[in-house]
Image (tube, rainbow, N blue to C red):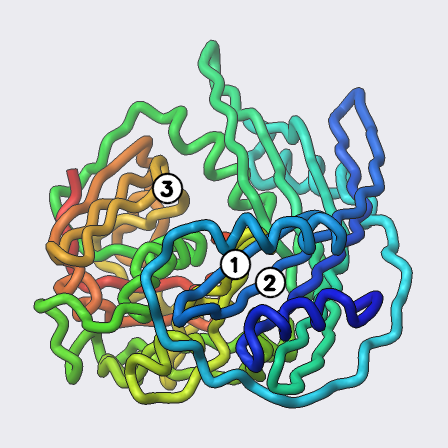
Amino acid sequence: MTDARLPGELERRAPGQWELYRKTADSRETVAAPDLRRDAWRREEGWAARWWTAGAPRFAAATSEERLAAALDDAERVSVEPSTPPEWPARKTAAPEASPVSPPPELFDELSRAVAAASRGEASLSALSLRHGVARERLVNAAGLDVSQDRRVLDGVASAVGRRGARAREARLPFRWTGEPDADALARRLADAATLPLSDRPSPFPSGQWLLDPAVGAALLAAMAPLFCADRPPRWVVRGQLASPELSVADDASADRVFDGEGVPVRRTLLVEEGALIGRLHDLTSARRAGARSTGHGARPSFRLPPQVGPARLFFETRTPATPAALLSAVTRGLFASALIAPPRVDLAADRYELEFTGISVVAGKAGGPVAGARSAGRLSDLLKRIRGVSTDTQFFPSPYLVGSPTLLVERASFE
């Protein structure tokens, strides 16, 4: 922090029961289209404080240190329910060396060619927005915590237009790359999302096996995420058999960050092991209620919000992975869900799911014709137990935290 005045003021208001958070973000962005290119350089700053006075939690946020100091009095005027303060972590780390933010890579032409090739000329890239940024976070508290970290990101939004005769459809996909840019994988997703709905063909089967593309599997997992943060699971959950023995779920953001939004070190947390629900995510507050320790999942979706329990890098995995080709060859009759038409509808309390998707029919392990749209709905518990294959092609998608999934094979599903 720039000086000791704000920590001193928080200590005066809440002796031993406060934390102070600062985030600065620098990014370089490029927006490109066939006849447009625009570059921008952005800088953002956010400050947040959380403290306990008279047994009640307080929170204030602002875009500068001075504005946060002025907001403290307003926060104490808000009526809130009393609660017990958390057990604050206490450790120190050296601040990482500052490094400049490089411009995002030049990918429009490469991605444009890849979309045209993946769609056999039926789709064209219409726009690409790329952002390369770094967020710098520092967190101090009354227990002596003083930690800092840098988090880098390369993400964006790509749009493509598919055309078939007089019909046209636009697809818009957000993406985030955790390693080297993968233009080919993004192009395949864009091409499918833009062209498959142009077919008039409905699902040729009322039921069958069901292959889920990594993007579809990740969207399903994101919709299920509250299950891993709840104090009590829904009544339908059988801890020993939540899912198929082929399926495990973990959260591990250690490759992306050192600590969470409360200064707790991040680590791998196994939530589902070979179908059995064995763990849950905790921040400091939920850990105190449960008599447990924080798992390092105090999430800050924005500096304007207090930390709350949430995933950081959630993904499906298995101990017995198969190649995507092996899963495809195992399908005797079914559908491959390539892209969602609408966000997943998952009701965890009622044990229900509904997915609307576009894709490809599969017969005897070979791809058939496109399917413009299909719907599958039923019990989420049945769907999870019917997963019989988990592939090796895990991909991660923004949700806004990262959610990962490989291709999944469901042994039986109903289609409409």
Query: Label 1: which residue?
Result: 59
Earlier residue among tags 1 and 2: 2
- Measured Cα–Cα span from mark 1 to mark 2: 6 Å
Q: In the shown orientation, is residue 240 left or right of residue 80?
A: left
Q: Amino acid at mark 3?
A: Leu
Dot 2 amino acid type: Ala
Q: Residue at x 30, y 60 (%)?
A: 224
Q: Specify the quadrant that holds the C terminus.
A: top left
Q: Are marks 1 and 2 in contact (CB under 8 Å)?
A: yes
Q: Residue 34 placed where, x, y %?
A: 76, 24
Task: Report helix, strand or loop for mark 3.
Answer: strand
Q: Residue furthest top?
A: 166
State the image quarter where residue 292 is shown.
bottom left
Against 91, is 217 above or below?
A: above
Q: Earlier in the sequence, mark 1 or mark 3?
A: 1
In the image, residue 181 above or below residue 273? above
Relative to 63, say whether 288 is above or below.
below
Q: How far apart, in angstroms, are the residues tagged by discs 3 and 2?
A: 39 Å
Mark 1 Cα within 10 Å, few/some/many (few <14, many 20+)? many
Q: Position of residue 37 (x, y in %)?
A: 82, 28
Which of pointers 3 and 2 lies earlier in the amino acid sequence?
2
Which residue is label 2 attached to?
Answer: 49
